[in-house]
Amino acid sequence: MPTFLGIDCGGSSTRTCLIDSDGAVLHRGQSGPANLASTPQLEIERHIREALAECPSATYAAGCFAGLLTDADRYRALNLLESFLGDNCTVTAYPDYHASLAADEATDVIVIAGTGALIASRDDQNRVTKSAGGGPLLGDFGSAFDVGRKALGATVLAPKPSEASPMFWESVVELFGTREPNQVLASVYRSVSPAARVAKLAPVVVFDALRGLEYAKQSVDSALDSLAENTTAHIAAHCRTAEELNIRLAGGLWDIDEMLSHMFRERMLRLQSESSTCVFNIELLKTEPVIGAVHLAKELAESRPK
């Protein structure tokens, strides 16, 4: 009986799931980040190995990787998968957002806000198009990293730090070992995954925003504004003829508090009323992206010659 393995290698974690032809789950695993663009190779290998620990053999596997940007990245990802899964497993590799887009077949547009952020959709020929992203150096506006970055800029790194909660400062010390600006910077840039480290501030920043602290409100509002504007621009460029779109929200930012998805929905509906008559159905993605990777492994099996 063939088995199908999905591997979701994100900027914060690596998740695996193996199922058989009857849909029974044979394995689940989780470990740290495996972003091809920002996580060191040895860490990627370690985290994939940990997530696959005690996993039975797979017949087909789809690995979906953050940071898979070029053909060379795809070749590297395939080599990684083959080294762990062996010659008896047929493998394929995609950028990580393919997993989120494939998780629910009703999804027209996926808005991912985790450590990073981007928007993706499929066209009439089933080709996937993405917008935004850019990683922590050139983009990721609207991500958990963006929220944390803005908060650090208004507090730790500001000439006159804004008021923040004791919980925020406790989180800064817990994450970076200090609240002294230069030492915080040194800790960030020495991190194995700097963006993932900064993104861990997002929950306490959202907490402060909901309590009305101005630094946090500005950080969260700015991030959500950017994400809504980028999503609307993506729809205008790539979904022009659609009369109705199912927009799904994926990634760890949305898990922090349900108010974030409500705030994003309000922004999208306001922008939609200004620029389009298309109906937006905006909901949280209820299926894990790693299950989308499993679906891609099944598609790989179906595409093989009988």
Image (cartoon, rainbow, N blue to C red):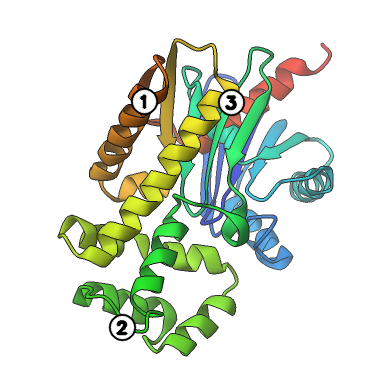
Quarter of the figure with the N terminus: top right
Task: Determine which quarter of the picture holds residue 304.
Answer: top right
Q: Quadrant of residue 139?
A: bottom right
Q: What type is the residue that disc 1 sits on?
A: Glu
Q: Are marks 2 and 3 in contact (CB under 8 Å)?
A: no
The residue to which callout 2 is attached is 160
Q: Tell me residue 87's x, y (percent).
A: 84, 39
Asked whether, in this view, residue 233 is left or right of residue 7, the answer is left
Secondary element at image label 1 = helix
- Seen in the image, is 112 located left or right of residue 38? left
Amino acid carrying mark 2 in the image: Lys
For label 3, the SS is: helix
Decide which of tag 2 and tag 3 comes sooner along the chain.
2
Please, is residue 41 above or below residue 141 in the view?
below
Residue beneath the point at 75% across and 44% down: 85
Residue where numbered disc 3 is placed: 237
